[in-house]
Amino acid sequence: MITLTIKKNRIGPVLGRHPWVFSQALTKIPDGLPPGEPVRLVGETGEFLASGYFNSYSQIAVRVWGYEKDETVDASFFTRRIERAYRIRKEYVEGPSTNAYRLINGENDLLPGLIVDRYADYLVVQFHTRGIELWKTGIVNALETILRPKGIYERSDMPVRKQESLDSIQGVLSGSVPDRITILENGFQFLVDVKHGQKTGFFLDQRDKRRACMRYSNGKNVLNCFSYTGGFTVYALAGGARHVTSVDTSESALELAKENITLNGLDPACCDFLCDDVKHYLRNIKEQSDVIILDPPAFIKDRRKKKEGVVGYRGINEMAIKALSGNGILVTCSCSAHLTLEDFRYLLSEAGGKTGRSLRILETYTHGIDHPQLVPFTEGSYLKCFIISL
């Protein structure tokens, strides 16, 4: 295993167990190191610090995946990592009412660059980095051994792969995988399009927020913006909503949302599904709603676009606040990693001020149990949600 030395004045983050090592923190990087090459990290006096894989000569040079001095990267290496991650999900998430969750959450499960989502008897995987892609065969073998899935599907079609000079890849890696999978989440059924849907098919990280929404829905008129395949819509109806309007730009997602309503035995007559741009819809809305849910895509995909993204978030929240009744509830989310929880709260305070409404936070949510976060890895914090009362 190649040994790389961390500069004395850059050793702090490694000792604090941050999973990224930047190229400037290393005394030297040998020429010709291929992405995925296992490396040992040591201090200038030779003491062992961590192990990981070499990823790139630019910026993030090493991604850390272990702290055991003599750990060998072999077939059992990935088995150990996956078993450890699976234990948490099996104990705290999986059960008779839930069979879909994030199994591997990249760096936070000491498998940097790897995402694995479980959908009932099937797995969907994403390889985000050139380094982790080298170990694809070993990872797939370990997943097969531990979970015995009926099929494993790859959705390595994320924009981030372009930064690694990687092609977009989609396809079956093991067994067979249907176009749509029926999952259980908190006792509700959902059809998931793992091959063509957003991300890996379903927003698993909103499970707890969807359930929380139920308590605010009884007897209410609910507007679900950026509704995708109707996750929040199903929960709102199950929570007793009088009527739910779902708005999304994807006709195919709305069609799946309609099927999810029927699948759960809910009344489709209590729903409207509108294919429209949410900003356009909110700008021209006439009637007020009792509850509005905003779950938009990331408006800030690059820190250089933060100001522009903040304007976008503030704008849709202003419009939503104006469209709420006097005692309305706003469920507002952001999945932009470059927008902190504090920044999100501040722009909401600005939106409240501009609309002349006093906003009170009833509940605050971040990641779910199946999306654990390493304490020092603040870069991995992306999801935030406020449930707000006017």
Image (cartoon, rainbow, N blue to C red):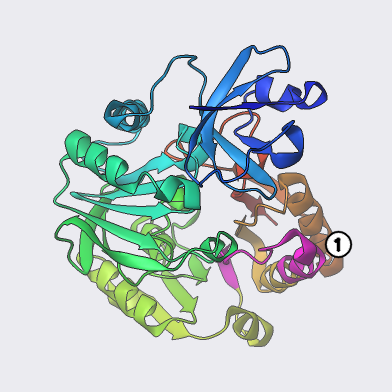
Residue 79 point in image, percent of width and height: 29, 30
Quadrant where the C terminus is found in the figure: bottom right
> Could one spot residue 201 in this view of the protein?
no
In the displayed structure image, the side of residue 32 where residue 258 appears, left or right: left
* Local SS, label 1: helix
Residue situated in front as seen by the camera: 11 or 228: 11
Residue 210 point in image, percent of width and height: 44, 52
Residue situated in front as seen by the camera: 222 or 164: 164
Please name the amino acid that badge 1 sits on: Gly
In the displayed structure image, the side of residue 216 where residue 182 appears, left or right: left
Instruction: Say which residue appears at 60% left-offset and 57% top-offset.
Output: 333
Residue 293 lies in quadrant: bottom right
Residue 96 point in image, percent of width and height: 20, 39
The residue at which mark 1 appears reads as: 353
Instruction: Say which residue appears at 58% left-offset and 43% top-offset.
Output: 365
Near mark 1 (Cα within 10 A), the count class, few <14, some 14-19 or many ≥20, is few
On screen, 117 above or below 253?
Answer: above
Residue 300 lies in quadrant: bottom right
Magenta highlight range: 289-314
On screen, 355 above or below 92?
Answer: below
On screen, 277 above or below 53?
Answer: below
Instruction: Say which residue appears at 66% left-offset and 35% top-offset.
Output: 21
Residue 295 shown in magenta: yes
> Could one spot residue 316 in this view of the protein?
yes
Residue 184 point in image, percent of width and height: 25, 51
Residue situated in front as seen by the camera: 217 or 341: 341
Residue 200 shown in magenta: no
In the displayed structure image, the side of residue 236 where residue 290 appears, left or right: right
In the displayed structure image, the side of residue 279 where residue 212 appears, left or right: left
How many marks are shown on the rendered structure? 1
